[in-house]
Image (spheres, helix red, strand yellow):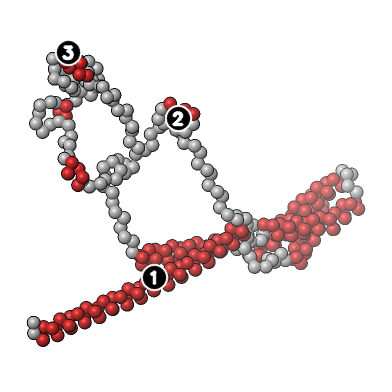
């Protein structure tokens, strides 16, 4: 071999060495990127888990309910030894094997003694053709003496050892087992990132819903407070009308009626609206205490009740 051939071989080996180093560096960089992506996804999942715990505590759910324990199967119990239970889907039925001394389906001429007495060769059974067990012929598979037609052929010992293994599937047996395809780490990480983004989107929607109160969620806090205080004042106005009717028949005196109209029922309406806003007008997740507009509520309640009484008096006088 000449010097030029040695030089060309050396250059080829050097190029292969450099290509191997570049491939190793690229593989190392890819692994570092994968590890960094895994750490980032782990941090995102940890933060999502903490946020979900906060949402669960806000709505009163600390942990998911435990799954009920599976009860005993239908085949267990004292009566399981009496016979097999119901067959599950995809399970092969366990048929009982015939006794060792069974010969022909008809039950006659079985055993060596009957074969000798009937003049037939030993182990031949009976002269009747093999059938299905109920007197019917077995078809082409059971016809003796026909070449190529009969029972399923038996593989030789050497070929049986070389036969491919098969896996029994739930749908039926004899289906070759499929090898699981090798998962691509980059593709799996991309799918995990997409699922994490979807979880973030649903989490933001849940937080927006948690920041709305159960009572009139689409209304502003001021409009909600005005509606609640006005509703409580209207209910107190109905009670004022009932007290006026009771005073007309002599059940309530004038001093008691005036006290309830001027102070009692307005105060009851005000505290009722205050409690309703605190119970159903507060979001599940909110920073601080939501405003209840106490001066506005006091003004509304102490104006609605006397105005209801004045409206009743004007109505009565107008009808007269």
Q: Name the residue that disc number 2 marks.
A: 80
User: Which element is circle 3 on?
Assistant: helix
Please name whichever residue, 140 or 164, is drawn nearer the observer in this view of the structure: 164
Quadrant containing the N terminus in the rendered view:
bottom left
Q: Name the residue that disc number 1 marks.
A: 34
Distance between the Cα atoms at labels 1 and 2? 54 Å
- Answer few, some or many: residues within 10 Å of disc 3's Cα (few below 14, many 20 plus, some between 14 and 19): few
- Relative to 251, say whether 220 is above or below: below
- Relative to 244, say whether 293 is above or below: below
Residue at 33 percent of width and 33 percent of height: 93
Residue at 75 percent of width and 65 percent of height: 294
Distance between the Cα atoms at labels 1 and 3? 83 Å
Q: Name the residue that disc number 3 marks.
A: 117
Please name whichever residue, 84 or 169, is drawn nearer the observer in this view of the structure: 84
Q: Quadrant of residue 35?
A: bottom left
Q: Is residue 253 left or right of residue 44?
A: right
Q: Is residue 172 left or right of residue 81?
A: left
Please name whichever residue, 225 or 251, is drawn nearer the observer in this view of the structure: 225
User: What is the x, y in percent for residue 158?
Assistant: 17, 44
Which marked residue is nearer to the observer: mark 1 or mark 2? 2
Residue 105 appearing in the image: yes
Q: Earlier in the sequence, mark 1 or mark 3?
A: 1
Which marked residue is nearer to the observer: mark 2 or mark 3? 3
- Answer few, some or many: residues within 10 Å of disc 2's Cα (few below 14, many 20 plus, some between 14 and 19): few
User: What is the x, y in percent for residue 112?
Assistant: 20, 19
């Amino acid at each position: 071999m000449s010097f030029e051939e040695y030089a060309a071989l050396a250059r080829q080996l050097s190029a292969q060495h450099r290509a191997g180093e570049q491939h190793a560096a690229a593989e190392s960089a890819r692994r570092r990127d994968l590890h960094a992506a895994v750490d980032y996804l782990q941090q995102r999942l940890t933060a999502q888990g903490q946020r979900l715990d906060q949402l669960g505590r806000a709505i009163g759910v600390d942990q998911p309910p435990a799954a009920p324990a599976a009860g005993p199967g239908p085949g267990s119990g004292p009566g399981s030894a009496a016979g097999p239970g119901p067959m599950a889907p995809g399970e092969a039925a366990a048929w009982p094997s015939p006794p060792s001394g069974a010969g022909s389906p008809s039950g006659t001429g079985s055993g060596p003694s009957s074969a000798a007495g009937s003049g037939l060769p030993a182990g031949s059974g009976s002269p009747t053709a093999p059938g299905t067990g109920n007197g019917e012929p077995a078809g082409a598979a059971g016809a003796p003496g026909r070449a190529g037609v009969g029972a399923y052929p038996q593989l030789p010992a050497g070929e049986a050892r070389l036969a491919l293994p098969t896996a029994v599937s739930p749908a039926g047996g004899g289906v070759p087992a499929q090898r699981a395809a090798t998962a691509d780490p980059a593709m799996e990480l991309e799918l995990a990132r997409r699922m994490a983004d979807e979880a973030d989107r649903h989490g933001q929607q849940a937080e927006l819903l948690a920041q709305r109160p159960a009572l009139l969620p689409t209304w502003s806090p001021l409009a909600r407070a005005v509606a609640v205080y006005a509703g409580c004042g209207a209910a107190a106005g109905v009670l004022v009308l009932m007290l006026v009717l009771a005073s007309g028949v002599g059940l309530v005196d004038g001093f008691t009626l005036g006290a309830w109209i001027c102070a009692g029922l307005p105060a009851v309406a005000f505290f009722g609206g205050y409690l309703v806003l605190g119970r159903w007008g507060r979001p599940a997740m909110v920073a601080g205490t939501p405003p209840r507009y106490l001066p506005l509520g006091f003004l509304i309640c102490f104006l609605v009740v006397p105005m209801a009484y004045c409206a009743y008096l004007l109505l009565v006088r107008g009808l007269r």
